[in-house]
Structures are given as structure tokens and as C-alpha cells.
Amino acid sequence: MTRRSLERVKLAVVNLFFILLCFAVLIPILYALSVSLNADNSLLSANFSFLPKHFTLRNYRAVFVDEPIMLWLKNSLILAVITLLVSLGTGIPAAYIFSRKRFAGRRLILNALVLLYAFPSLLSMMALYKLLTPMGLINTRLGLIIVYTGTMAVFALWNMKGYFDTIPLEIEEAAKVDGASPVQIVTRIVLPLARPTIAVTAMMILIYVWNEYIFAINFMTGSDTYTLAAGLNSLQATEMSGSWPVFSAASLVVSFPILIIFFALQKNMTTGLTSGGVKG
Amino acid sequence: MNSDTKKKKKRADTLFAYLWSAPSLLLIFLIVIFPILYTGYISVTNMNVYHWNNYEFIGLQNYKDALLVFDNGFLSALFRTILWTAVNMVLQLILAYVLASLLNIKGLRLRNVYRTLLIFPWAMPGYVSILLWKTGMFNSQFGLLNQWLTKAGLEPVKWLGSNFMAFFSCTVVNLWLALPFMITIIDGALQSIDRSFYESAVLEGATWFERTRYITLPMIRPIIAPSVIITVFTTFKQFDVIYLLTQQVGSKTGADIHTILTYAYEKAFITNNYGYSSAISMMIFAMLIVFSWLSKANTKEASI
């Protein structure tokens, strides 16, 4: 056998390996997709195939009609938008100040932020519950917004500060020499340059609120106040086998926007995160 | 400018800085720091479901209970968490390295298609994937794995039932979730290595093993180090995989594979032993502080 054909065999083996691997990796998602589109309730039958034999959208209809998913969607969106506005509104000026100014206490606060970033908010959930109870904020949107905003404030400040650090100071100094006022420098120069990090930070906050379930299921008691994540969680926890096709349809519906955002922002995601202070 | 006005200017600058960052810092203090301090306070009381308001100060009793009474389960959860982190990190690094190397084989035309497909688990919301694994794959009656086993004429397996199988299944799901990130990082690092290093090494007759040992690994190490450290943290703090697969209220699978985070959660929200759970939380926080100091010292050393 020539060297050339040996190479070709090697490539064919690697290709075959990757095709099988990609399929294996996607099996849980493909299976859910197939179950959600399959008309006969043949979950227990032995001749299951990935291509549904009798195609139906009944399960998707059930998701939107029978389950209060639109209500949960509304709750999630309200929480996400308010959390986003508050944490970006407070985070952008703070991140800018911490990147540009040197003042007493700055180091200390930055070091504390690193530690807070490593601290899982799950661990103080109990204390938060105890603190919010007498204020009447359990089982209210405001209570969850408060929790989310705090967690995201740490992330927003730290992540955007890291990006501001990479914008050269010379640009601002040049603008100053040209007679721009501090407000003009920030609104005309810094914010446009910081657009990638603001976009990525905003997306990460949206995804966080969209995916957060543990605070939502503990702080919200009624299914009408649930967020999407908490609602989906309750769908699978209460009625097991009967609702599995509906649950898989709901899972894919809930994942869809996140998939779109992820693949649309994939390039930005890596630069916006790796050039920021916090990665991963 | 004399020193007095300089000082005044500096003070004005500081005031300005704090004024603009005040909203953010205030939020962080009230919502993040204060609850942590409060957790520390609860940890030295006997607060539980019977003593919700009339709790008493009991000193370090909760810490003693956790550290000295082995049957309470904290120490075994801690050992399990360390084992979990070690097993997952080793498997993740080896598998990600092998797959990233294969993706970089010369002449692999479809590599971008493979990359996109392999990244899918990263793009999915984590909790959704975990629940899909739980119901779609592992369910003992209609899960796909048991369907296949039955078809092959084998006995169905309780994937989440025993401690060993549950640990194994959780590891599989965690790898499924975490590998895309690690592959991406190592893939990027591999591409940053100059091809000419390999060409001259091949000319000098270096074997594949020698090239890996003396060129590839030392060159990608500093690049992937920060991401690896972050992954160690997230693996150590992993809650979703273990909680959603085995510990959910009302659908516990019978396996006891608590990590310290699911343990702290159970003590707070299931058995309602708030004081004890807060003590666990404070100890986890202390461990995370020590780790971040250690990793900071290590990365500094590596980068010099």
C-alpha cells in the first residue's frame, strides 16, 4: 500500500469516527425531538425509530394550549428585562470607574469581587429566604428580581471591567485634547467601543434568568408565578411517563431561543468572554 | 499646585468614583455580601423549622457536628466531591485532548461541521439537557438505554438506582455537558502552535509521543490553564447534574451521591436544619477562598 492510500484510509476512519460520535452526542436531543413529533404513544414498544412513523404536532399544541407556558414565558421575560436593565444600568458606570480611576479601596473591592464571583449564590439561598420573608417578598416577582440582580451585578461589573481595561486609554486622552467633555467621551467613544462586551454581558444575563430554576422553584409557590425554567421543572416532576412527549416538546421549545442566541453570538461569545476578566 | 490642593483633588476623585459606582456596589453589598454574613450568623445558631424565630446562639456546635460526626454525611460528601472533581477533570482533559487532536488532522474537510455539531450540548440550557437525559435516556421503563438493552436480550439496568451506577451516569452527563467547552479551548490552543515546530521535529526523527510530550503539551499548557482552573471550580461546585438526576424532591432515585452543594441544599430546604446547613455553606465558602488563592499563586508562577 502506498503512503498516499494509507493516509486516505486513515482519514476515512477518522471521518467515520466523527460521524458516529456526532450522532451519539446528539442522541438525547434527537430522541426528544422524535418523541415530541411521534403520534402513537409507542414509548414502550420495542421497535422505536428516530424517524417518527406517524408525524404529529399535537404535543407542541399541548405545550402552548394546555400548559400555562405563555404565562411562564411572560414571567421569565419580565424578570429578565428588569434584571438586565438594573444590572447593566448600575454595572456599566461602575465597571468604567473601576477600569479607569485609581482610588482608595479599589484593590480591596476588586479582590472581594473575585471571591464573590466564586461563591455559588445557592449557598446563601437560605439566608436570602429568611431575609425576604418578613418583607413579604417571597412568592413575588420583586423577590426573584432582587436575587437575580445581585448575582448578575457581580458578573456584570467584573466582566465589563475586564473589557474596559483592554480599550486603550490613549483614545480617550486624544478626545480630551480635542476638547471633548467627560460626558461626550463616555457616550461617544467608550460606549460604542464597549458594545461587544455590553452585548455579551446582556446575553449572559438573559440566559441566566432564562435558565435559573432552583431559586424560582423555592421562592415561587404557585404555578402561575413560575418562570419557564421552574415551570418546565414542574412539568417533569409531577406527571412522569404520561407527559414525557409533551415535556420533550416543551424542552425543545424552551431551548430554541437559547440555541439561536448561542450560535448567533458564538464568535462574540468567545472574544467578549475571554477578553473580559471572567472566562467560561 | 501645593500638596493641600492635591490632596483635596484626590479626595474629590475618590468621592466621584464611589458616587458613580455606588448603585452597583450597594446592590452587591445588600444582596450578595449581607446574606453571606447573615449565613455566617445563622451558622452559629440552632435555627431550624422548630426554631424559626426563637433560635439561640449555640457557638460552633454546627461546625463540630459536621466535622466530627462522620455519620452526618458531610465528610463523605466532601470526599465524594473531591473524587467527582478528580475523575471528571482527568476524563475531560484526556477526551478533549484526543478529540481536539483528531479535529486538527490534516485534510479533514468536514471539521467545521463536526465542531458545530459537537458544540451542541454547550448551547442547550443545562437543566433541560439534564432532564432530557434523566427521562429520555436513564428512565428505567421507557429510557432509550434500557430499550436497547431489552432489545439486545439483556436485563434492564437501574441507571440512577445504586450509588455506583448513579455516580457513573452523572459523570457521563457531566462530560457530555462540559466536553464541548474543553474541546473548544484545546482546539484553539492547538491551532495557535506554529506548524514549523513539528516539521523540524519530524525531520529530526521525533516520534508522535515525543512530539506530544515535548512540543504540544508544554505549548498548550499556559493557554488552557485559566480555563482548566475555571472548570475545576465549576466541577467542584456542580449542583444541577447530581441534584436533577438523583435528588429531586419527590423523585429521588435511591442513590446517595451527595456532593457538598447538594448536601447543603438538602439540609436547608428538605430537612430544614438551617443552622447546620449555614455552617456547611460557610465551610464551602472558606474552601473556595483557599482554592482561589492557591490557583492565583499557581497561575502567577506559571506565567513568569
Image (cartoon, rainbow, N blue to C red):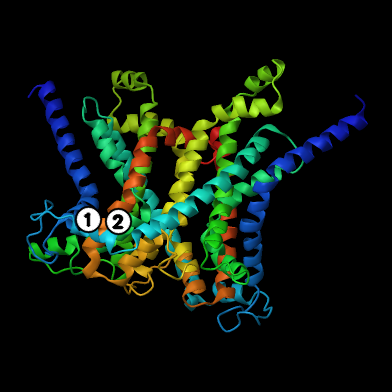
**A195 in relation to B41, above or below:** above
Point out the tag, 1 or 2, that comes first from the N-terminus.
1
**Local crowd at mark 1 within 10 Å, few (<14), some, or many (≥20)?**
many
Across and down, in percent, residue B18 comes to 74, 43
- Quadrant assignment for the N terminus of chain B: top right
Q: Which residue is mark 1?
A: A32
Across and down, in percent, residue B237 comes to 47, 57
Across and down, in percent, residue B169 comes to 29, 61
Quarter holding residue B301: top right
Whether residue A227 sits left or right of residue B50 in the image: it is left
Tag 2, which chain?
A: A
At a point 67% along the width and 79% down the height, the residue shown is B58
- Marks 1 & 2, CB-CB < 8 Å contact: yes
Whether residue A94 sits left or right of residue A238 in the image: it is right
Please state the total of marks drawn on the protein image. 2
Q: Amino acid at mark 1?
A: Ala
Q: Which residue is mark 2?
A: A251
Tag 1, which chain?
A: A
Q: Amino acid at mark 2?
A: Ser
Q: Is residue A74 visible?
A: yes
- What label does residue B140 carry, if any? none
Q: Nearer the viewer, residue B260 or B294?
A: B260
Q: Nearer the viewer, residue A221 or B301?
A: A221
Q: Nearer the viewer, residue B82 or B6?
A: B6
Q: Nearer the viewer, residue A24 or B35?
A: B35
